[in-house]
C-alpha cells in the first residue's frame, strides 16, 4: 500500500472514530432526548408507548404471529408452555418484492393476507379462531395495544396510503376482503418489543430489546410514572417503550454520511440508523471506495461499475470483505492485492463505528435504568449485523468495557434469534391472559 493510501486510511479512521469521551457525551445527550421524548416534547427519540407490559413467563397456548421487518415477512405459529419455554410450531418466510414495498396499500395488505393463507396451507392449519400478534417494524403511534398509526416509512418502504393511518384497521379490512375474518389481531408491536417480549419470557434478567439488522432500534421496560406524556389510565407499574433510536440526531457526521443521507429516500431523518444499520453500511463503504477510486488511491479497474446500482453491497458481502474474502472474483473482476487490503480496512472502519455507536446507545439505556449498574442486564438482540458480521459483537463488547470498565461484565449481549416474531405470539398470549 502506498504512503498516500496509508495516510488517507489514517484520516478515515479519525473521521469514523467514536472515542470514549465522545461516547460519554453521546450517553449524556441520549438521556436528554429520552427525557424529552418521554415528556412528549420535541425529541429525536420518539419514545413511543407500546401498551405492552413485560411477560411473566407463565402465559400458555398456541398463538399466531406475523413479523414484517425489512426484506422478509414471516408467519409463525408458536406454542408457549407456561414455564418460560417456547416452541415454534410452524414458520413460513416470504420475500417482499420491491413492487410490494413501493406499491399501493391494498396490494401491500393483500400480500400479507396471502402469506397467512399460504402459511395455513403449508402447515395444514384449518381456519379457526386465532389470536394474532402483528410485528410491524416501523414507527407507529399507539393509543392502545391493537391500534397503531404509522408515522413514516423507513428502510426503503414507501407504500402509498398508509402513513397517518391505523395499520391494524388496514390489515383487518384486507382480512375481511379475503374472507379471513376469523383471525383476530390482538396486538401490534415493534420488532424490538417482540424481541424483548421473547427475551424476557425466557429470561427474567432481560429488560431491553435491540434490533441490529436492515434497520436499528431498541426498546426497554420503563416505569409508568416516568412516561409523563401518557394520559391513559394504565393499571401496571411498567410499560415497554419503543425508543425509535434510529432517529437520534446528536451525532457528528462526516462527508460520507452526508452523501448517503442526501441520496436516501428520507434525507435528514434516521441519522443514527444511517450510521449503524445494515441497509446503509454497504452504501457508506461504497461512497468511501468510490472517493478513493476517483482520487487515484484505488487503481483496480471494474470496481466502480460493480457499485453503480444503489444499495447493492449487502451486509453479508461487507462482512466477507472485512474478513479479507475476495467477493469480486465471482464476478470476474480482478482486484490487486493492495486494493483489496484497502477495501478490507474500509469495511472494518465502517462496521467498527457502527458497533461502537450501537454499544454506546445500549450503555445509555442501561445507565438510564440502573445508573450505578447495581444489577445484571441481559440485552436481547436480533438482526443479521449482530448475528453474522464477523467481529461486530466483540467491537460492541470492547466499547462497553471502555465506558463501564469492569462493570461491563454485568451487561450480557444475547442473540435472540427470531425474537421479533416469537415475541408477537408472546404478546398475543399476554393479552389473552388478561382477558381470561
Ligand atoms: C424502524 C423501527 C424498527 C427498526 C428495526 C427502523 O427503521 O423505524 O421501527 O424497529 O428499523 O427493524
Image (cartoon, helix red, strand yellow):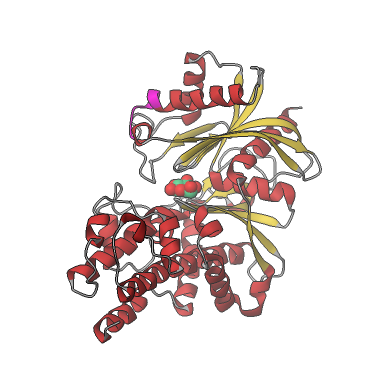
Pick the residue in front: 334 or 122: 334
Number of numbered discs overlaid on the protein picture: 0
Specify whether residue 268 is in view: yes
Q: Residue furthest right?
A: 83
Image position, residue 245 (x, y; %): 47, 55
Pick the residue in front: 317 or 433: 317
Residue 49 vs residue 340: left or right?
Answer: right
Residue 202 vs residue 301: left or right?
Answer: right
| Residue at the image point whose x is 46% and y is 29% from the top | 166
Image position, residue 269 (x, y; %): 34, 52
Image position, residue 82 (x, y; %): 80, 39
User: Is residue 190 shown above or below 390?
Assistant: above
User: Is residue 278 shown above or below 339?
Assistant: above
On the image, which quarter does residue 119 sit in?
Answer: top right
- Does the magenta segment cover residue 426? no
| Residue at the image point whose x is 45% and y is 62% from the top | 319
In the rendered image, the quadrant that contains the N terminus is: bottom left
- The range drawn in magenta is 102-107
User: Is residue 360 shown above or below 21?
Assistant: above
Specify whether residue 248 is in view: no
In the rendered image, the quadrant that contains the C terminus is: top right
User: Is residue 341 shown above or below 427?
Assistant: below
| Residue at the image point whose x is 29% and y is 46% from the top | 265
Pick the residue in front: 56 or 378: 378
| Residue at the image point whose x is 39% and y is 33% from the top | 164
- Does the magenta segment cover residue 106? yes
On the image, which quarter does residue 44 sit in?
Answer: bottom left
Residue 324 vs residue 221: left or right?
Answer: left
Amino acid at each position: 500500500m502506498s504512503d498516500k493510501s496509508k495516510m488517507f486510511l489514517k484520516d478515515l479512521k479519525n473521521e469514523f472514530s467514536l472515542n470514549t469521551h465522545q461516547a460519554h457525551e453521546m450517553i449524556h445527550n441520549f438521556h436528554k432526548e429520552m427525557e424529552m421524548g418521554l415528556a412528549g416534547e420535541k425529541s429525536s427519540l420518539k419514545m413511543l408507548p407500546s401498551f405492552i407490559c413485560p411477560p411473566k413467563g407463565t402465559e400458555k397456548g398456541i398463538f399466531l404471529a406475523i413479523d414484517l421487518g425489512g426484506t422478509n415477512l414471516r408467519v409463525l405459529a408458536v406454542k408457549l408452555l407456561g414455564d418460560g419455554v417456547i416452541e415454534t410450531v410452524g414458520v413460513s418466510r416470504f420475500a417482499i418484492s420491491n413492487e410490494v414495498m413501493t406499491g399501493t396499500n391494498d396490494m401491500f395488505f393483500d400480500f400479507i393476507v396471502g402469506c397467512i393463507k399460504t402459511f395455513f396451507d403449508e402447515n395444514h392449519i384449518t381456519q379457526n379462531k386465532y389470536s394474532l400478534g402483528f410485528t410491524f417494524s416501523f414507527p407507529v403511534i399507539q393509543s392502545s395495544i391493537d391500534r397503531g398509526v404509522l408515522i413514516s416509512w423507513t428502510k426503503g418502504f414507501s407504500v402509498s396510503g398508509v402513513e397517518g393511518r391505523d395499520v391494524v384497521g388496514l390489515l383487518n379490512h384486507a382480512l375481511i376482503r379475503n374472507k379471513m375474518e376469523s383471525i383476530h389481531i390482538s396486538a401490534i408491536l415493534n420488532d424490538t418489543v417482540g424481541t424483548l417480549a421473547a427475551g424476557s419470557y425466557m429470561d427474567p434478567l432481560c429488560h431491553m430489546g435491540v434490533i441490529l439488522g436492515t434497520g436499528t432500534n431498541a426498546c426497554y421496560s420503563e416505569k409508568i410514572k416516568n412516561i409523563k406524556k401518557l394520559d391513559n389510565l394504565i393499571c401496571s407499574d411498567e410499560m415497554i417503550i419503543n425508543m425509535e433510536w434510529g432517529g437520534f440526531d446528536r451525532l457528528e457526521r462526516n462527508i460520507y454520511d452526508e452523501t448517503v443521507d442526501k441520496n436516501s429516500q428520507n434525507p435528514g431523518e434516521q441519522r443514527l440508523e444511517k450510521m449503524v444499520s445494515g441497509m446503509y453500511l454497504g452504501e457508506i463503504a461504497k461512497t468511501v471506495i468510490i472517493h478513493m477510486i476517483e482520487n487515484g488511491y484505488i487503481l483496480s479497474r471494474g470496481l466502480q461499475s460493480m457499485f453503480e446500482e444503489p444499495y447493492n453491497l449487502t451486509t453479508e458481502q461487507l462482512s466477507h470483505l472485512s474478513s479479507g474474502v475476495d467477493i469480486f472474483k465471482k464476478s470476474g473482476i480482478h482486484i490487486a492485492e493492495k486494493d483489496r487490503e484497502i477495501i478490507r480496512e474500509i469495511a472494518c472502519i465502517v462496521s467498527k463505528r457502527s458497533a461502537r455507536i450501537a454499544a454506546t446507545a445500549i450503555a445509555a439505556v442501561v445507565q438510564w435504568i440502573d445508573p450505578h449498574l447495581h444489577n445484571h442486564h441481559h440485552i436481547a438482540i436480533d438482526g443479521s449485523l449482530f448475528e453474522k458480521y464477523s467481529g461486530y459483537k466483540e467491537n460492541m463488547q470492547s466499547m462497553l468495557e471502555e465506558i463501564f470498565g469492569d462493570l461491563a461484565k454485568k451487561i450480557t449481549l444475547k442473540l435472540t434469534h427470531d425474537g421479533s416474531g416469537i415475541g408477537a405470539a408472546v404478546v398475543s398470549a399476554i393479552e389473552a391472559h388478561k382477558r381470561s
